[in-house]
Image: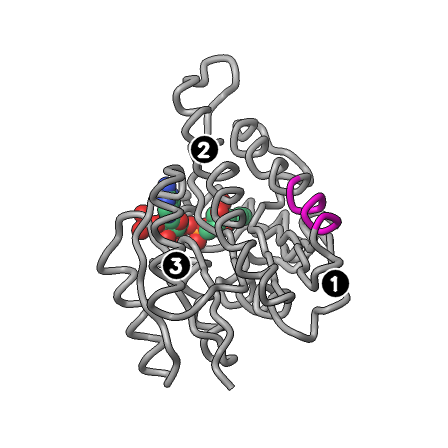
Amino acid sequence: MTAKVALVTGASKGIGRAAAVALATHGRAVACGYGSDDAGAKETVRLIEEAGGTAAAFVADVGDHEAVAAMTAAVAEELGPPVIVVANAGMNKDGLAVRYDLEDWERMLRVNLTGAFTCIRAVLPHMMKARWGRIVTVSSAIALRGNAGQSVYGASKSGLVGMTRSLAKEYAARGITANVLCPGFVETEMTSGLPDKARRALDEGIPVGRVGTVDEIAAAIRFLASDDASYVNGAVLAVDGGLTA
Ligand SMILES: NC(=O)c1ccc[n+]([C@@H]2O[C@H](COP(=O)([O-])OP(=O)(O)OC[C@H]3O[C@@H](n4cnc5c(N)ncnc54)[C@H](OP(=O)(O)O)[C@@H]3O)[C@@H](O)[C@H]2O)c1
């Protein structure tokens, strides 16, 4: 049987890389989408191939509709039609609302929210044809509880929740599920550079007493993308050590 193809955006590092590796080691052929980090994307492909899996890297700015359409066509051509999409690519720029630059607002919404929508929309026809599909969007604990300085990031991540739950109703009859994953604080490039004092305060505020690892997030993504999750649809799954409990 040929492997089902998964497109994971933001797979050049962090959560996306771990998700790509987890999916590949569970039998999926993985298209590793990325924005600009060629070396990071190559490394993800290398890790997958080293583990005996199948993967290829595909560059596209998810904020660019045409680039997303071209990337999806290239994935279908090279690996086969994608029927799993993990909309993980994202950016963050904190700032107080009162002086937040509106160009940064536009960019964040375009990458984090519109980018997820266009990637999912590009993959949906393949899922509909296969009458099977898995959509996983990577939101954030900030969509569930808010955080000072993160109104823009929070808006983009809350948008994913409403979008994904609506998709869950729109395509369920065609064997396609859509679920949202909300990670808490996870150690990646996006969250690096936190001073020790802030880091200690953060750890203490998380019920399990520590930040999460990329592999802990990837395990949940892998489950949501699996056959085992066939009756999980429209769920908002917090993987945050109890932060939003
Ligand atoms: N880390 C956390 O604590 C945390 C918590 C909650 C939610 N999240 C969410 O989880 C996701 C992954 O986060 P992470 O911590 O793994 O981040 P990361 O290490 O900074 O990686 C971000 C990934 O997104 C890609 N990306 C960014 N902008 C892009 C664009 N315009 N087009 C295509 N790809 C783009 C990057 O590609 P290039 O580097 O190749 O450009 C990179 O692969 C994000 O959506 C983030 O908001 C993270």
Residue picked out by circle 1: 232
Where is residue 88 drawn, in percent x and y? 48, 52
Tell me the kind of residue under disc 3. Ala
Residues at discs 1 and 3 in contact (Cβ within 8 Å): no
* Residue 106 at least partly seen: yes
The yes-or-no answer for disc 3 within 8 Å of ligand 1 is yes
Label whose residue precedes the other's in the sequence (1 or 2): 2
Secondary structure, magenta segment, majority class: helix
The circle drawn on residue 99 is none
Residue 60 located left or right of residue 211: left
Residue 113 located left or right of residue 101: right
Residues at discs 2 and 3 in contact (Cβ within 8 Å): no
**At x 41% / y 29%, what residue is drawn?**
107
Comparing 85 with 207, the one in front is 85
The CA span between labels 1 and 3 is 24 Å
Residue picked out by circle 3: 11
The CA span between labels 2 and 3 is 18 Å
Residue 148 located left or right of residue 18: right
**At x 36% / y 41%, what residue is drawn?**
66
The magenta segment = 163-170
Residue picked out by circle 2: 110
Label whose residue precedes the other's in the sequence (1 or 3): 3
Say above or below: 189 vs 65.
Answer: below
**At x 58% / y 28%, what residue is drawn?**
148
